[in-house]
Image (cartoon, grey):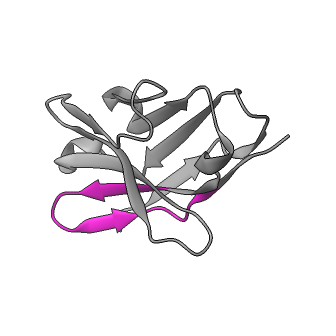
Amino acid sequence: QVQLVESGGGLVQPGGSLRLSCVASGSIFRFNVMGWYRQAPGKERELVAHIATSGITNYADSVKGRFTISRDNAKNTVYLQMNSLKPEDTAVYYCRGLGGGSYWGQGTQVTVSS
């Protein structure tokens, strides 16, 4: 059974930074793509960023230049470094793995507020 566990969320002031982590229960090489999604209250879940096994990345326009997705294959972990956070970044952030199915983590809350 594949499990993805996110961590690193919390409360941060506007302009601050957070780093989210997503640890897989097995090798992340099984996933062709790993991504971070977010869902704000009353809104649909949306893609934030994803990274392929090749290392190619893709970002939502709203986070380009502020967020960076990366992966550490040895640690079976994908990260999302979030800088210059804005109140509109407030959401539950989910990790997703695509490969032989679609797998989701349980989510981690990020709140950006003064």
Which residue appears at 63% of the width and 34% of the height? 85
Instruction: Place residue 101 in its image quadrant.
Output: bottom left
Which residue appears at 35% of the width and 28% of the height? 74
Q: Position of residue 77 (x, y in %)?
A: 42, 37
Left or right side of 61 for 29: left
Q: Number of labelled discs?
A: 0
Answer whether residue 102 is magenta in the image.
Answer: yes
Task: State the extent of the magenta-drawn residues as a range.
Answer: 94-108
The front one of 48 and 2 is 48
Left or right side of 96 for 108: right
Answer whether residue 65 is magenta in the image.
Answer: no
Residue 11's place in the image compared with 106, above or below, is above
Residue 61's place in the image compared with 83, above or below, is below
Residue 111's place in the image compared with 83, above or below, is below
Instruction: Place residue 78 in its image quadrant.
Output: top left
Which residue appears at 40% of the width and 60% of the height? 46
The front one of 81 and 34 is 81
Left or right side of 36 for 52: left
The front one of 78 and 90 is 90
